[in-house]
Amino acid sequence: MPHDTPLIATIVAGLGLAFVFGALANRFRIPPLVGYLVAGVLVGPNTPGFVADAGLANELAEIGVILLMFGVGLHFSLKDLLSVRAIAVPGAIVQIGFATALGAGLSWMLGWSMGAGLVFGLALSVASTVVLLRALQERRMIETERGRIAVGWLIVEDLAMVLALVLLPALAGVLGGQEQADAHASSLLSLPASYGIWGVVGITLAKVAAFVVVMLVVGRRVIPWILHYVAHTGSRELFRLAVLAIALGVAFGAAKLFGVSLALGAFFAGMIMSESELSHRAAEESLPLRDAFSVLFFVSVGMLFDPFSLISNGWPILATLAIIVIGKSLAAFVIVVAFGYPLATALMISASLAQIGEFSFILAELGVGLKLLPEQGRDLILAGAILSIVLNPLMFLAIDWMKPWLERRATRTAPPIEAKPVGPATEPGQVASIAATTKAEDGPPPGTTLTNHAILIGYGRVGSLVGAALKQASLPFLVVEDADKTLARLKADGIDTVSGNAANADVFAAANPEGAKRLILAIPNAFEAGQIVLRARAANPGINVIARAHSDAEVEHLKGLGADTVIMGEREIARGIVEEVLGHKPGAAEPSAA
């Protein structure tokens, strides 16, 4: 058996060190991704000791990007994407143009050519898929209006970068580089320069359109059919394999056949699969691999970074970082506010885009290969990516600090405008225009007038059943939920709601826990549920708290924090089976409930 196993060594070193430094970062209340980046620096070629295979690490990281975008697609629909096109398309285009101009200006100061400035500016204009989605997922914003705008913006940037990757080889000679470099001649993204600029653009757009049509016409029928067929076999292993095969297969096919990026192909695969009733199960099955490979993405980024470049390229790195973190953020903020969106949305979008990642690396490598970008430019892009990713969590903390101050100034300088619905509803009970719904996003949600009520946290598979029972029994209750579609459905049914994450102090306070009789935690996340239990006990020591759990350890954790009753799903299933087996005999032995 061969012992030269670079793939295994890369995975073991990457995940092992990422765990160690991620745990240390978490211990000091630093985002774990900083630990992952440090792990990458340590196994990279620029530090002494073990050196992992950078090529393999990049390919493993690409799998993480594919699975992450596939997961986002599972929570998206075509209507969601189209509903934010009015802000995502012009916003992304203007922001790309502004950031590219800033990057070109810095390159001119460094004495580079016009072509180098174009490549450098484009690389600084596009945000990292992994970082942006991680930030949205941690804050449970994927299914909110702000999250949909951010993802729509990301998709437009992705399409723009695909077009840039196709055009750069064709324009390399004009821009002062090497026309159609050999290293890229075999790429399906590269088209002959003899087609002309508009010919290349037309063919590229035709390929993207063909891919979209194939996915909407063929994929919409084939993908759900495959899922349902495999689900009826009863094999969880085959179902998990089918989900991964569809995600990776569609992404790879989109890149090879249509010239679309892997991430964009995976996103469309997930979006088509979201129309199936099995989409929730598909998301659960792909989650562990998504997390593992997204960690490898950060490790692979760290491997590319030379820490000594911070000394040799001090001020250019600072200028690059300023363009990414300040220039892009200000541009996005101004654009979103100019379109009439609230400050909360503008701040979140600007913080989300204040970093760069995978597409920036691809553009940098292409630029160096075409002799357009000097190697110093690639080093600046890598340094800017690393530092902006590290600083991105701090950007979100900064907007949390700035938001109340900006809102107070906005309130003093502008009279309140009552938002009205515009256009037809995209879903029952939901208006198409953001103008009717964004007002509630600025500042804390309005408080409820209910008293002696039940607070139901989460309205998923468990919460919706509990809510239906409470409604049938005519018991007063309200739902705390952060998914816009669910909130629209609840409001259409006349159920009181509070929009947001109940772990947030302002959101939970709006549910009036002081006057509530009961708190029902229907969310599966025991850690988050524990935070809410602590808030409830502090606000109302006499409130009756009922929670759900999936293990004995979670039961003990929640009870230790103050929950009165914790229902474990597996235990209740066992109770039901025993009752059926024993014929509901009184006095029969039953598993004890928590």
Image (spheres, rainbow, N blue to C red):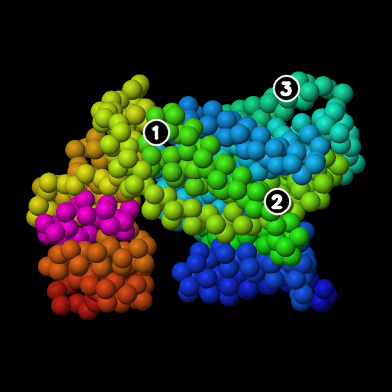
Q: How many marks?
A: 3
Residue 452 location in percent, x, y? 9, 55
Residue 77 location in percent, x, y? 47, 36
Quadrant location, the C terminus? bottom left
Residue drawn where x is 19% and y is 71% of the image = 564
* Residues drawn in magenta: 501-520
Circle 3 packing at 10 Å, graded few (<14), some (14-19), many (20+), is few
Residue drawn where x is 22% and y is 79% of the image = 589
The CA span between labels 1 and 2 is: 34 Å
The residue beneath circle 1 is 341
In this picture, is 179 found above or below 447?
Answer: above
User: At label 2, which amino acid type do we have?
Assistant: Pro
Q: Is residue 60 visible?
A: no
Occupied quadrant, residue 102 = top right
Q: Is residue 295 visible?
A: yes
Residue 316 numbered mark, or none: 2
The residue beneath circle 3 is 202
Of residues 18 and 111, the one nearer the viewer is 111
